[in-house]
Amino acid sequence: MLDANKLKADILEDMRVELSDEFDRNFERKAFFSDKWKPRAHDYPRGSLLMVSGAMRRSTRGEVSGDGVRFASAMPYTTLHNEGGTGYKQVRAHTRKSKKGKIYNVRAHQRKFTMPQRQFIGDGPDTQRIIKAVINDNLSRFNLSLTNFIRTK
């Protein structure tokens, strides 16, 4: 017998699992599915793009919330990387030595920077394809399909 609430819960949980796996794989692809990320301005010897320590990748979690799946991260810089934008870096007070050997003090200040968008979580054609596949897989257990369900409503 078809239990609509159980079916909905199964679909949402399967969407959470499938999307979590795909969003995690975006770090390996260095892209949002097939949309490649902009490369770094400087090539640093530590870590891959967006994966110096792996903390942001590990902190990203999906949870079923109401009628959907919500993804969040405990890292404060995740949104800036995912959406791009402008940020500010705190520079501490320190001393600097000039090329002529003169030592001078640098005051604490903020430095403005622009972060290019390197999306790894979000909606798009690939996300919609995964969602439709999850719904169809769950409906097929009851010999139903998404296209027939939409046409009858």
Image: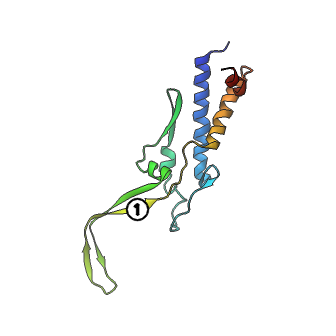
In the image shown, does 81 or 146 lie closer to the viewer?
146
Q: Mark 1 sits on what residue? A: 113
Q: Seen from this angle, which residue lies furthest top?
A: 1
> Residue at 53% across / 27% down in the picture?
67
Q: Seen from this angle, which residue lies furthest bottom?
A: 100
Task: Count how many numbered circles sit on residues in the image.
Answer: 1
Query: Left or right: 151 with respect to 98?
Result: right
Query: Left or right: 49 with respect to 141?
Result: left
Q: Seen from this angle, which residue lies furthest right?
A: 143
> Residue at 52% across / 55% down in the picture?
51
Query: What x and y, as percent, mark residue 55?
Result: 47, 50
Please name the colour scheme applied to the rendered image.
rainbow
Query: Left or right: 109 with respect to 87?
Result: left
In the image shown, does 145 or 64 lie closer to the viewer?
145
Query: What x and y, as percent, mark residue 24?
Result: 58, 45
Q: Is residue 72 above or below residue 94?
A: above
In the image shown, does 36 or 73 lie closer to the viewer?
36
- Please name the amino acid that badge 1 sits on: Phe
Query: What x and y, as percent, mark residue 76?
Result: 40, 48
Where the C terminus falls, by quadrant?
top right
Q: Is residue 115 above or below residue 76?
A: below
> Residue at 48% across / 44% down in the picture?
59
> Residue at 61% across / 25% down in the picture?
10
Are there few (<14), some (14-19), or many (20+) residues within 10 Å of tag 1? few
Does dot 1 land on a helix, a strand or a loop?
Answer: strand
Where the N terminus falls, by quadrant?
top right
Query: Left or right: 129 with respect to 121?
Result: right
Query: What x and y, as percent, mark residue 90?
Result: 32, 60
In the image shown, does 75 or 113 lie closer to the viewer?
113
Q: Is residue 150 above or below residue 59?
A: above
